[in-house]
Amino acid sequence: MFWPLASAALALGVWALVVILAKPAPYILPAPWDVLARIWTDRSLLASHGLVTMAEILAGLLISIVIAIPLGIAIVAVPTAEKLLYPIVVAFNAIPKVALAPLFVVWFGYGFLPRVLITSSIAFFPILVSTISGLVGIEPDLLRLARVLRARKFQVFLRMRLPHALPSIFAGIKVGTSLAVIGGIIGEFVASDSGWGYLLVQASGTLDTTIMFAVVIILAVVASCLFSAVAWVERMMVSWHASQRS
């Protein structure tokens, strides 16, 4: 807890120093104390828009996890699935999601669903790749031991491959969590009348830089908290792994 707070204090200190020494116009770089005061003054507005964005982020992340992990398992377990599906997934990931956003609006309307789909499409790929990497990265000696013991494929998967893959899967989820925050904002840029992304668009039109910085700070805090929450779950579930030993 100390080091994240120390990093935040350092960033605020550098920011304040730049404002004091350079004296930029407030619409270019507002002072950190003005931004913090604005967060408190407009806390109700920020909270109401934040509920929308948080719902999109969490729903999109959940969808990406629920689809990516089983798909990764299927790709590893069934060679045909890897040959058939993996190239499609890679090609889909290469498409800029900003280009897909207007299509989602056309297909699913102007509402909550297209924004969730944009979020999940951005968070999906790192979770899938990490799942596949973890499942296939098991040590060959363990597989040879399983063959000697005449373990069935399901037993090998359940007792060897899946536990071995958990750290990699959680690494993908942590990356996906950060990307889900980005995806939620991108979705609101394109198709929204509420949320922090919508607030950013409105503020940019009026050069209200203070509220823009307020939203950016809140997003950074939210992303850090979600990342820490996933890391905590990882420590609880994978406490036996060498990466969790201090």
Image (cartoon, rainbow, N blue to C red):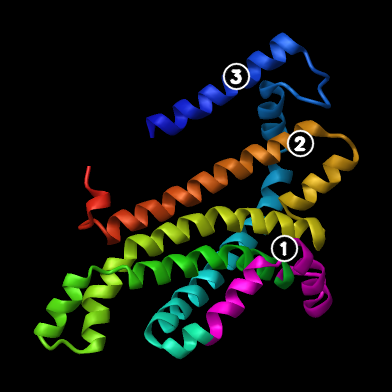
Specify the farthest residue to the left. Answer: 149
Residue lying furthest right in this view? 206
CA gap between label 1 and label 3 equals 34 Å
Q: Residue 42 placed where, x, y %?
A: 73, 37
* Residue 92 belongs to the span the image colors magenta: yes
Q: Are marks 2 and 3 in contact (CB under 8 Å)?
A: no
Q: Nearer the viewer, mark 1 or mark 3?
A: 1
Mark 1: which amino acid? Pro
Identify the residue shown where x is 82% and y is 68%: 102
Q: Upstream in the sequence, badge 2 or badge 3?
A: 3
**Is the C terminus in the top left, top right, bottom left or bottom right quadrant?**
top left
Q: Residues within 10 Å of mark 3 (few under 14, many from 20)?
A: few
Rendered image: mark on residue 14 = 3
Look at 50% across and 55% down and name the residue there: 175
Residue at far top of view: 21
Residue 96, disc = 1
Please say if the residues under marks 2 and 1 sit with CB atoms less than 8 Å apart. no
Of residues 90 and 208, the one drawn nearer to the viewer in this rendering = 90
Q: Amino acid at mark 3?
A: Val
The residue to which callout 2 is attached is 211
**Callout count:** 3
**What's the residue type where badge 2 is placed?**
Ile
Q: Closest to the observer: 47 or 195?
A: 195
User: What residue appears at the point 22 percent right and 52 percent down from the top-left corner?
Assistant: 242
Q: Report the residue at 39% width, 67% height from top.
A: 133
Q: Is residue 231 left or right of residue 186?
A: left
Q: Quadrant of residue 38?
A: top right
Query: Of helix, strand and loop, which one carries label 2?
Result: helix
Q: Is residue 141 magenta?
A: no
Sequence-wise, which precedes: disc 2 or disc 1?
Answer: 1
> x, y percentage for residue 53?
67, 56
